[in-house]
Image (cartoon, rainbow, N blue to C red):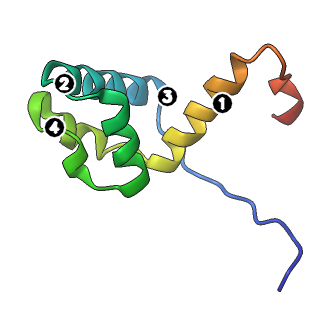
Amino acid sequence: MSDKTKQFSIGNQNEDEIRDIILTTYDALNEKGYNPISQIVGYILSEDPTYITTYKNARNLIRRVDRFELLQILLREYIEKSDDFDFETIN
């Protein structure tokens, strides 16, 4: 067993495109009466597209987003908004 830490690398899908897809998915889920946060989290964790409605083509859209890249963006946004963390030190 190696003590070295593996590095994880992902593609660079356009963040604006991802944001638009997530917002469209969120709106579609909300309009259909679902809890959008819970449904999107369920999809991210399971990769089961049935967590996402087909309304407004949301299911097809969200499947175009790399889940690992989405998690990286969400974590970065969360950390950047934290007053107690200097994000620049880890870039």
Q: CA distance from mark 3 to mark 4?
A: 22 Å
Tell me the amino acid under the disc marked 2: Ala
Q: CA distance from mark 4 to mark 1?
A: 27 Å
Instruction: Tell me the quarter of the picture where residue 41 sits.
Output: top left
Q: Which of the image's four quarters has the N terminus?
A: bottom right
Does 85 sit above or below residue 3? Answer: above
From the image, state whether disc 2 or disc 3 is nearer to you. Answer: 2
Identify the residue position indicated by label 4 in the image.
53
Q: Nearer the viewer, residue 46 or 88?
A: 46
Instruction: Tell me the quarter of the picture where residue 64 sits.
Output: top left
Q: Position of residue 48 (x, y in %)?
A: 28, 55
Identify the residue position indicated by label 3 in the image.
15
Mark found first going from the N terminus, 3 or 4: 3
Query: Which numbered marker is on residue 28?
Result: 2
Identify the residue position indicated by label 1 in the image.
76
From the image, state whether disc 3 or disc 1 is nearer to you. Answer: 1
Mark found first going from the N terminus, 2 or 3: 3
